[in-house]
Image (tube, rainbow, N blue to C red):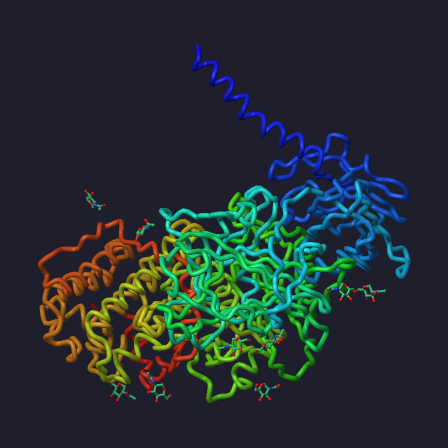
Amino acid sequence: MTIYKSACILFVIMCIPILLNAQSNKDESFILGCGLGENGGKDSDGRQWNPDNKYVSGGNSVTAKASFQDPSLLSEVPYMTARIFTSETTYKLPIQPDKRYWLRLHFYPSVYNNFNPVDSYFSVTANGVTLLNNFSSYITCQALSQAYIDREYSLSPLNSDVLELKFKPSDKHNGAFAFVNGIQLIQMPDLLFDSPSLVGYPDQTVDAKSMHMQTMFRLNVGGQYIPPVQDSGLSRTWYDDTPYIFGAAVGVTNQAEKNVTIDYQAMPKYIAPADVYSTSRSMGTNKDVNMGFNLTWVFQVDPNSMYLTRLHFCDYHYLQSNEIVFSIFVNNQTAQDQADVIGWTGRQGATTYKDYVVYVHEEAGDDQLWLALHPNPTTKPRFYDAMLNGVEIFKLNDTDLSGPNPQPSDMMMEYEARIRNFEDKNGHSRSFAIGGAAGGAAGFALVAAICIAVHQRKKRTPGSYTNSTSSWLPLYGSHTTGTKSTSGKSTMGSGANLAMAQGLCRYFSLQEMRHATNNFEESNVIGVGGFGKVYKGVIDNGFKVAIKRSNPQSEQGVNEFQTEIEMLSKLRHKHLVSLIGFCEEGEEMCLVYDYMAHGTMREHLYKGNKPIDTLSWKQRLEICIGAARGLHYLHTGAKYTIIHRDVKTTNILLDENFVAKVSDFGLSKTGPDMNQGHVSTVVKGSFGYLDPEYFRRQQLTEKSDVYSFGVVLFEALCSRPALNPSLPKEQVSLADWALMNKRKGTLEDIIDPNLKGKIKPESLNKFADTAEKCLSDSGLDRPSMNDLLWNLEFALNLQENDGTSSSTHNNSAHIDESDFEEVNLNQRNDMAAHYKNLSLGSEHDLSHDSAGNSSAIFSQIGNPKGR
Ligand SMILES: *[C@@H]1O[C@H](CO)[C@@H](O)[C@H](O)[C@H]1NC(C)=O
Ligand SMILES: *[C@@H]1O[C@H](CO)[C@@H](O)[C@H](O)[C@H]1NC(C)=O
Ligand SMILES: *[C@@H]1O[C@H](CO)[C@@H](O)[C@H](O)[C@H]1NC(C)=O
Ligand SMILES: *[C@@H]1O[C@H](CO)[C@@H](O)[C@H](O)[C@H]1NC(C)=O
Ligand SMILES: *[C@@H]1O[C@H](CO)[C@@H](O)[C@H](O)[C@H]1NC(C)=O
Ligand SMILES: *[C@@H]1O[C@H](CO)[C@@H](O)[C@H](O)[C@H]1NC(C)=O
Ligand SMILES: *[C@@H]1O[C@H](CO)[C@@H](O)[C@H](O)[C@H]1NC(C)=O
Ligand SMILES: *[C@@H]1O[C@H](CO)[C@@H](O)[C@H](O)[C@H]1NC(C)=O
Ligand SMILES: *[C@@H]1O[C@H](CO)[C@@H](O)[C@H](O)[C@H]1NC(C)=O
């Protein structure tokens, strides 16, 4: 009985705060869906939005429904209904005079009845504080390439018990009207506890506490989008930081181990959710590379204003102070000379934040706020690195937070027009699944949309080169969600934003391409492929890239270009070459890739027809394993089976650590799903590597890649070209020659002399057996990429372990999870600077080998029964 009773009391006690809370929330927050009917509505997060009509007073206003629902709208409520004001109108909302409030305004510039958002210019004031002036949500959304915009303000105590929120159509534009879709007014706790100092004037503090603020940016650095419902109690939205990173040096992202608890110590939890503190971005593992660059974010802001930059830190990895010490620069001024996170917090996993205030003046080009981190070696820290977990940027002012409308870039307008054109032509709106598109000009428009990542700050004048680098589109207020797009309703709108926010693909102007390659100077050509020439280039002041430029005459080139962007922007794997971005202007098309320091696998095996001794057997095995992983991913890891169709040693590139990466997806085809078990098409690929079955039947399966890979394996073993027409007839084709020797037991005679005596017999046998199986005449007899991988790993194991212990890998369980991390994307900084050579694309290698003897090759190919 007593237990029952006390449980009852406990229950009541526990309920009191909940009831109180609910009560106080009811009094103090207003979540208004403007134009909603009397029952209001729920948004996609399940939050209730109430009708606004009770609070409107004076003026002329009507409610209306949007004529079109953009598929990128995450929720119908509150965006699909609006209140439209044709004269000055005020909302009156009760508040407490001494409390700070969030005020959030939501705008979706669609056509409402006869109201076209193009004509909407208006101002909004809150008890005399100007929030917006001459505001065009249409222009703002267009410039940011998003369907709607949310504005968030934090109003300091207004000394009044009513908030008067005034909407006033501009009198400078004929027929101007004002509108709003949603209003949130929520009492908030203090976020500012100390007076932050002014960057550059360390002894000057700013009384930010008494100021009104507008949230400009709020980013979960190195982490994911956090929707309002997952915030730590203040219904804030946190975005991914990738779009704001300057240049290609994106550093690496990290995540706290599961066993580390995020410890707020004395800090209130509402400062930022644990998700923000448990992910971070740092520079990378290479000390020399880190010393050579700044990890930099660039934000577009309104000039002539003061900004509070709040940086969130939590070091969940290291244990002691002086392990990582770095400098923080805000707008190129030192904000913090020696930041040492553990030094500040005293322990692993503890959170902290730092506030810096900076004034952005109106000078040429000064509409940006730069945040940069750089290791500071002064105190001899253990690692030369820097890190950041989260960032918020607020604009501060007492009276006026408004700014000018942004200017959409020419390029953005062009793309908008292109997309619209595409939609009109195809008679449907932006509701494509990303996965489904294939080829054709329309396909390109779609891809372009996926990749729109443009913010052209400087006006481009035709024919002139600028030194400016295109920064990422400032996406503040966009709606990229990792969670929503997996719900199966992936649309182009959100897909585009997702791709952008993840930094999957970047758009370059032709000028940038010209500038990178010294106007496509011949001396920068590092390869020639079917698609056109490949140039080496430098972007972002020193980051090396490989640029494939299309040959405008080649129709095939256009299709390959589309295929490659489409495939690569969706595929991320440690053993696939990453696409950084593309350029498409008029006739010109370029693809921009990571620069691979060590060039092709082939150039480390032989030169001309002579073996060269640069790679040990172990290295060769590791390269083969890496390439096999890349191909395995293509065959099984992506949504569709992807058949590479042109596997060869010139399409396997090596980075500075000799990590193999498969490149050149120009011929790739998505496989079996399309065509009952095979893809029939014109035979493509490279002589010497062509699957005879494919050649005979014109049916492509992933086993064709396995065949070609078998040739690669023998190339690695024998260090000779797949085809060498200068040899006696039976030796011309490596595949035939190697198989013949393997069967006769004389393989040892033809292996690279540099390897003789250095390969353990067990390893050689395993390897050669595997390669032989790959070259089986029938695809069914060839191993899958998975079996192949296992066998190669086994061969490596046999080489390394004296053949005594056997592989610990299981035949199904050796897909290295780490391959799927964003390694490619995030270690680009490691690739800055120290590169020598690279080659991509390689048709010309073949013509080089076979000069004058193509007839021999053709007869070889035409008669695949040779073995
Ligand atoms: C967490 O686990 C990792 C290995 O998974 C270990 O190295 C580390 O010491 C652990 N940290 C704590 C705080 O237990
Ligand atoms: C506040 O805004 C006004 C008008 O834009 C501007 O002149 C003033 O410099 C701003 N004050 C601060 C502290 O940023
Ligand atoms: C900071 O310096 C970079 C070059 O180092 C320059 O491009 C940028 O405009 C500067 N930013 C500001 C706000 O001064
Ligand atoms: C990093 O930024 C600071 C401040 O703008 C600048 O002085 C420094 O030269 C930069 N360092 C590098 C390596 O770019
Ligand atoms: C209002 O904004 C538009 C678009 O940015 C601009 O063209 C116009 O000059 C502005 N009008 C005023 C009065 O500032
Ligand atoms: C680009 O910058 C370099 C050095 O920063 C300068 O020498 C060159 O003239 C600039 N080019 C243009 C077109 O501005
Ligand atoms: C490896 O595979 C064998 C059978 O194939 C299985 O019994 C064993 O549990 C597997 N081991 C691991 C670590 O998965
Ligand atoms: C890179 O190319 C240059 C000339 O093009 C050559 O001298 C050099 O040896 C090459 N380096 C490597 C690592 O292949
Ligand atoms: C082409 O092959 C023939 C034998 O098939 C040989 O006599 C001739 O020298 C070769 N030509 C070249 C350019 O290698």
Q: Is residue 662 above or below residue 778?
A: below
Q: Is residue 330 left or right of residue 863?
A: right
Is residue 657 rendered to the left or right of residue 542? left
As rendered, which of 531 and 467 lies closer to the eye?
467
Residue drawn 80% across and 56% down? 130
Residue at 10% over, 67% down: 761
Residue 825 visible from this viewpoint: no
Q: Is residue 802 visible?
A: yes
Q: Quadrant of the C terminus?
A: bottom left
Report x, y in % for residue 4: 45, 14
The quadrant of the image that shows the N terminus is top left
Residue at (39% x, 80% y) in the render:
835
Return the residue nearer the eye: 322 or 101: 322
**Between 578 and 603, the one nearer to me in the picture:** 578
Name the spot of residue 374 as percent of width and height, x first.
47, 71
Residue 853 at x, y percent in the picture: 31, 84
Residue 175: horizontal and vertical position, in percent? Answer: 90, 55
